[in-house]
Amino acid sequence: MAFLVSNTMTSPALMVLLCCFLLIANGAHQSEACYGTNQKLQSLQVSAPANQPYLTSYHFRPPQNWINDPNGPMHYKGVYHLFYQYNPLGPLFGDKMIWAHSVSYDLINWIHLSHALCPSGPYDINSCWSGSVTILPGDKPFILYTGIDASGQQVQNLAMPENLSDPLLKDWVKFSGNPVMTPPNGVKDDMFRDPTTAWQAPDGRWRVVVGGQIDNEGMAFVYWSWDFIHWTKLDHPLYSVQETGMWECPDFFPVSINGTIGVDTSVLNPGVKHVLKTSLFSDKHDYYVLGTYDPQMDIFSPDTDFHGNSNDLRYDYGKFYASKTFFDSAKNRRVLWAWANESDSTQDDIDKGWSGVQTVPRAIWLDKSGKQLVQWPVEEIETLRGKQVSIHDKELGSGSIVEVSGITASQVDVEIDFELPELEEAELFDPAWVDPQQLCNDKNASIQGRFGPFGLLILATEDLTEKTAIFFRIFKGQNKYVVLMCSDHSRSSLKEDLDKTTYGAFVDIDPHHGKVSLRSLVDHSIVESFAARGKTCITTRVYPKVAVENEAHLFAFNNGTQSVVISSLNAWNMNQARLSEEESFKL
Ligand code: DQQ
């Protein structure tokens, strides 16, 4: 434990921390416990079958079994780390969840390491659930995670690298004094989880948020600490909202008011606003609110009320949950990861031998309007682009369909700019249409409008019996035009027993300026779509029966009565990311 001895901190608080480090040195040697468990579990595994049309090529996942939430992403000494919830026993969620660990130099190609945290002590013997990493001064990363203890209650635990000079941070030790937080009075044992990355307020104390619920009021509990070991709960939550139920995986971070540059989690100055994100257990969506953080009162005041319904802002209006951001100091950006669960049946997951993928990492920043966030796949994803095809200045008359040929449509990155004509004749928007998902459901891709539906048909068969339609409709509202983005899965597969929910969201742009853009990242069974350069995002899981591998086609279409023009379309075949298996997955 060289880093303990080399610590030169002098203030009283930091001396306490040093003493605690020494205590930690007496903690369990976690990597050994993990390794032993892992070896045993691996022998029970059945390998994923060879025929895998839905296996992704450039989205992150291990070779087999169940994954869910991203945990503790960080950039540390030139290496990106991603931990994630993993069930080493099989393709469904398990009752001994662990933190698996992978590393990367570019956020695209990953090496799977041995598992970081496995159930081992009374404070986490029933699972190591989600949590975050905080890098303390002196380059010391600490994990705070939820343990399910011997009596089934949710407690918060600490762990740290065994050897700070190992850039891959392969081995982790747990604090001998765990747990460091137990469910507060009045909070049920199973409603207290998922600590955030901590931040240090100007008074020098660390703050961390833990998700929870009291009665049906969802909330972000705040704890503070001088030494990162002893945590005291504040009387009031950072923020809470009645009737929203359990808040899972909260995230709390600053964003620059001007520009796309990301800032570290403790940054607090007039140049930033704060984002509070919560993953609502009730509907499995990630909602966020923008607002102001008061470090004296430790209160978050949102700019707009939050209700946890279709009026609220979401990172993504499709399958996207338990997300987490980190500050990437290498590129001064904030990066967002999320779990995209399957939409197939449990039996399908058992047959596939795996379940769940991570979305591509996205840079995230505050929109110029100050009213919403914007996301865009990290630029590194473009290094996977191969053969390119383009279409320019192509008019799409009413009912037209144009194939984007010459690419592998099951593994593609496509960007399309539509040029719009004069919108005076647009259909009137009914103010009663408050739920965009419902509107997309009622007006699916086969229902003709005036301006729209127009967009892309993805993972489609040549005869269009299978297709996933990602499209826009434009309406004329009272004072402005309204742009609707939809992802229609009603014809996505000839297979039954799939969740084919249609997704939808409004795009806050003024189409009167003549353009609307769409980018879709297609990777066999996942499609991530970004409208208007990342203002509205929809992620979907799709399982065509026929339109797989080389049988998949990509089309642009217009089913509105009015023409639109493809001013530019570029599509690139995507190469496979390298996901190498280290020993832990081969055993
Ligand atoms: N998943 C974890 C929990 C978290 C939930 C367990 C969110 O910590 O609340 O795998 O998906």
Image: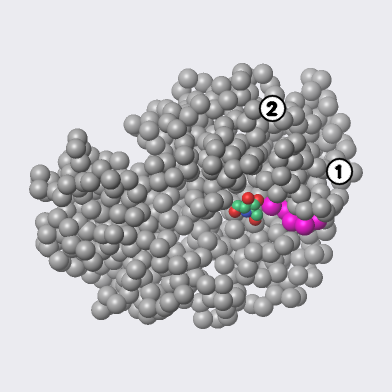
Residue 203 picture location, percent across and down: 67, 18
Q: Is residue 543 above or below residue 51?
A: above
Q: Quadrant of the C terminus?
A: bottom right
Is mark 2 in CB contact (under 8 Å) with mark 1?
Answer: no
Badge 2 crowding class, 10 Å Cα cut-off, few under 14, some 14 to 19, many 20 or more, is some
Q: Nearer the viewer, residue 108 or 483?
A: 483
Name the mark nearer the viewer: 2 or 1: 2
| Residue 24 drawn above or below residue 529 | above
* Residue 347 horizontal side relative to residue 158, left or right: left
Is the residue at mark 2 in contact range of ligand 1, meaning its CB lies under 8 Å from it?
no
Using the image, tell me which numbered label, if any, was put on residue 192.
none
In the displayed structure, 559 sits above or below 43; it is above
Work out whether residue 304 or residue 87 is closer to the camera in this orientation and state it: 304
Please name the residue shown 76% across and 70% down the image.
41
Image quadrant assignment for residue 194: top right
Q: Is residue 520 visible?
A: no
**x then y, percent, for residue 172:** 77, 49
**Magenta segment, prevailing SS (helix, strand or loop):** loop
Residue type indicated by callout 2: Leu
Marks 2 and 1, Cα distance to the nearest angstrom? 25 Å
Q: Amino acid at mark 1?
A: Ser
Q: Which residues are magenta?
A: 124-129
Give the left or right position of residue 115, taking residue 330 as reference. right
Query: Residue at position x 54%, y 43% from top?
Result: 244
Q: Does the segment drawn in magenta span residue 126? A: yes
Q: Residues within 10 Å of mark 1 (few under 14, many from 20)?
A: many
Tell me what residue is drawn at x 17 percent, y 47 percent: 428
Location of mark 2 (residue): 234
Q: Which element type, helix, strand or loop, lies under badge 1? A: loop
Please report the residue visible at 54 percent of the width from the left and 47 percent of the height from the top. 280
Residue indicated by mark 1: 176
